[in-house]
Amino acid sequence: MDSKEEIYKRIPHRPPFLWVDRIVSITKNSIETMMEIPEDLDIFSGHYPGKPLMPGVLLCEAAFQTGSLLISEIYLEDDRENKGVPVLTRINGAKFKRAVKPGDTISVIVTIKERVGPAWFMKGKVLVDGKTAVTVNFACAIAEI
C-alpha cells in the first residue's frame, strides 16, 4: 500500500503540497509513513539560505496528512466519497527538537489517542535518522469540502 496512487485514494492532497511519499504500516490505531525531503525544494532558497532547513510547519503538515490517511483508511473505507474528508481542526503543543535538512528522509508516526463524536485526537511524531524532530498533538474531523 505504499504507492502514490494509494495515497491519492485516501486524501485530497497533491504535489506540491503532499508531504507523504509512502505508507509503511497501518494498524487499528496507528500509522507510519515516510517522506524523502527533496534537495531542490524551492522553499530552501528562502528558508535559511546557505543553511537550509525544512520548515517546522511543513513537518507538522506531514503528521496531519499522515493522520488523515489513518482516518481515511480505518474509518472511511466504505463509501468514502459520500462522507467527506479528514480536515485539521486543532493543533496543540508542537515541539521542535531537531532540524530536518534537504535530502533527509523523515518517518512520521501518528497514533489515535481518542475519538469523540466526529473528532479524532491524535499524537504525531516526526523522526529523522531515528531521532525525534517534531512532536505535535492535533485533531481532525470529517468535513465536506
Image (cartoon, rainbow, N blue to C red):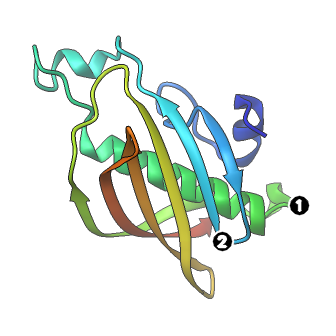
Q: Position of residue 91 (x, y in %)?
A: 34, 67
Reading the image, the residue beneath label 2 is 29
SS of the residue under disc 1:
loop
Q: Where is residue 28 in the image (x, y as percent from the top left)?
A: 73, 70
Horizontal relation, residue 120 to residue 58: left or right: right
- Image quadrant in which you'd find residue 4: top right
Answer with mark 1 or mark 2, whichever residue precedes in sequence. 2
Vertical position of residue 15 compared to residue 29: above or below: above
The span from disc 1 to disc 2 (Cα, nearest Å) is: 20 Å
Horizontal relation, residue 78 to residue 71: left or right: right
**Residue type beneath disc 1:** Asp
Q: Where is residue 45 in the image (x, y as percent from the top left)?
A: 19, 14
- Image quadrant in which you'd find residue 104: top left
Q: Circle 1: is it few (<14), some (14-19), or many (20+) Cα within 10 Å?
A: few
Q: In which quarter of the image is the C terminus?
A: bottom right
Residue at left 79%, top 40%? 1
Reading the image, the residue beneath label 1 is 79
